[in-house]
Every structure is written in structure tokens, then in C-alpha cells.
Amino acid sequence: MSDCLSILFGGHLRKGTTSHQRFCALEQLGHRVWPVDIYPPTEISSGAILSRISHKLFRLGVPYLGPLDLTQANRQILKLVDKHPIDVLWLEKGLQVRPGTLRRVKQVRPSCTIIGYCPDDMAARHNQSGQFLRSLPWYDVYFTTKSYGVAELKALGCPCVHFVANAFDPNTHRPVTLTAERKKLIGASVGFIGTFEEERARSMDYLASQGIDVRIYGNDWETFRSSTPNLRIEGRAVYGDEYAEVLCACDINLCFLRRANRDRQTQRSVEIPACGAFMLAERTDEHLELFKEGQEAEFFGSDEELVSKVRYYLDHPEERKRIATAGRERCLRSGYSYHDRLRWMLKTGVGTR
């Protein structure tokens, strides 16, 4: 594989997204990266409404549908492939990309390697589209952060699938020094950043009912109601530098897994320790492979154990800090950054040709 590749990168390129972080990491590795933003702005429009309806119909079982190509991504991809000698077409959750587009890429650039990547569960219907399913045979390789997804994506028609663990962006996920005022403004004894799910909501409500200060940032919490004043819901998501600040402002950061994605690890699993912040996560075999329990992170398997460990570590700040420091050191030592992961993925992916 050449040290410098010409990569056409299709993904969600709004600043602050993990897709944009991976795009920047590829540039920082020295590659020439051409951007194609697959996902439109979040503003409500007639096109966006039609796109959501189309995707919902697909999830309900109507074949061939999915989100609409509102950014003209297929046209952009073909235009760039015609103009430039692209070595790699990298697509992140390319639900809008049509199989005819990938077929044309192969005709114009036979040596181009088509690589797919997504941290979501791409074998689940809600993460798919008709275009995506019909395009899978055209991918040279697909990388999934779901270990069970390897066999499932192969069964759906993708010829080569590899598992890769989650990663962090060293430019974003790093220790942040905060003033006492800033820490008080955004932090808490126990914090969580993530989208609403019923099970995690119940666990944090129970934790707060035990007299522990809990603060939640994330989307879709508008309809959740708690009877305890110790649970504070901010009603907004945080990204980029503010995300790292919130993690560093909380004494304990919870890491719940998303049931809808059948998670055994998630992006927060690596991002929290990379910030030098203390992580208390759901115990899984993959979490235990990433970090040593009680030394580099902490884990729980029930609400009762969650409460017990929160109380213990709030009472033992020096031990908490020691584990947080070791967690960050593990991230650096074991190569959990996007730069390290992407270097391996490109070597593995281009090597499949």
C-alpha cells in the first residue's frame, strides 16, 4: 500500500461528528482526502420530511426505499471519481449511495477499493436502506464495530467483513483543565452523555433516588419525567470540545450500552478514558478486553452494583483519579486512536484487493 492514498470520503461531515473526526484523521495521516457530505443539514424541509417518510416505510418492510439523496452524494461521487485517480472510496453508513454508483466507480477506477465503515449495527433494519442492502456486494471490505456483525453482514451479501473496536479522536478526546466555576457550571458527581433509552433512564433515575447527583446530556429526553430532584436533564447534546469538557467536569462518567444497537462496547467506551476521565460502564466481555476492571476503568452489572460503586468511588477520589489516568494510558499504549485504527483498516482493506 502506498504511503499516501487518494481517498474519496463519504460521510456525515458536520464538525463535531465522529465521521468528521475520522475524515480529519485520514488527512493527518498524510492522505489526500476528497469530502462528500452524504447527510443533509438538520433543518426541517419538505425534502427532509419526504426522506424520513421514505426511510420509515423501508423500516416497516417496503423494499428498495430509504433516506433520499438530498445532498446529491451519488452525483458528487461519480464526478470526483471521473476527475481524480481515486485509490479508495470510503463510505460511512452510505444509506443513500446506490449500487449503480458503486458499479460505475468500479468501471471508471477498477483498482479503487470500496471500503464501508459504521459504528452502528448495520444488520439491524433501522440502520439500513434498500440502496445499502443492494450495494453490499460491491464493497471490497466492510468494517463493523459489532463483533456479531461480521457474520451477519456477510450473510447479507458483503464479500469481506472485519471487526474493529471503537476509537477516539486525540484532538478532541483529551484531558481538559477546567476552572472551578466552569466545572460547577457543566459538571456533576455523576454524568452521562447519550440518547434516551428506557433502561438507562430507569437506572439513572434509581441512582438519583438514592441521593446521588446525576446530570444527563443528550437527545430525546424531552418526554422522560423523574420524581427525584437529584436527576438533572439538560435537554441538549454536547459535541467536540464541550463534550470533552463535560466528561472532565464529572467525577464519574456512566457508559450505558444501546440496546437498539446490541452494543457490547460503544464510542463512549473509549472516548471517556481517552479524556483521562473516570468511566463506570456496563460490564461486557468486550469492555473487559479494552480495560482492566478496577485498574483502568470500572464496570457494573446491576443497578445495585451501580449504586454501590458510585458511592465507593465518590468517597475515594484518589483511587478514582488513579484509575482514570491508567485508562488514558491504556488508550494510548494499545492504539485506540482513530489514527491507529484507520492505519490498520486501510492496510487491511487495500490489502484485500
Image (spheres, helix red, strand yellow):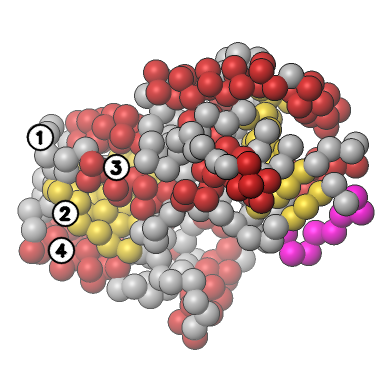
Residue tagged by mark 4? 80
Task: Please tell me whether mark 1 sits on a helix, a strand or a loop.
Answer: loop
The quarter in which the C terminus is drawn is: top left
Q: What is the magenta range? A: 221-228
Compared to residue 128, the image places residue 52 above or below, namely below
Residue 309 position by quadrant: top right
Task: Please tell me whether mark 2 sits on a helix, a strand or a loop.
Answer: helix
> What amino acid does circle 2 point to?
Lys
Looking at marks 2 and 3 on the same chain, the residue that comes earlier in the sequence is marked by: 3
In the rendered image, is residue 152 in sight?
no
The quarter in which the N terminus is drawn is: top left
Residue 113 position by quadrant: top left
Tell me how far mark 4 sits from mark 2, CA to CA: 13 Å
Tell me how far mark 4 sits from mark 3, CA to CA: 21 Å
In the rendered image, is residue 95 in sight?
yes
Compared to residue 165, the image places residue 105 above or below, namely below
Tell me how far mark 2 sits from mark 3, CA to CA: 26 Å
> What amino acid does circle 1 point to?
Ser
In the picture, measured across the screen, residue 261 lies left or right of residue 155, that is right
Residue tagged by mark 2? 106
The single residue placed furthest to the bottom in the displayed view is: 46
In the picture, measured across the screen, residue 341 lies left or right of residue 286, that is left
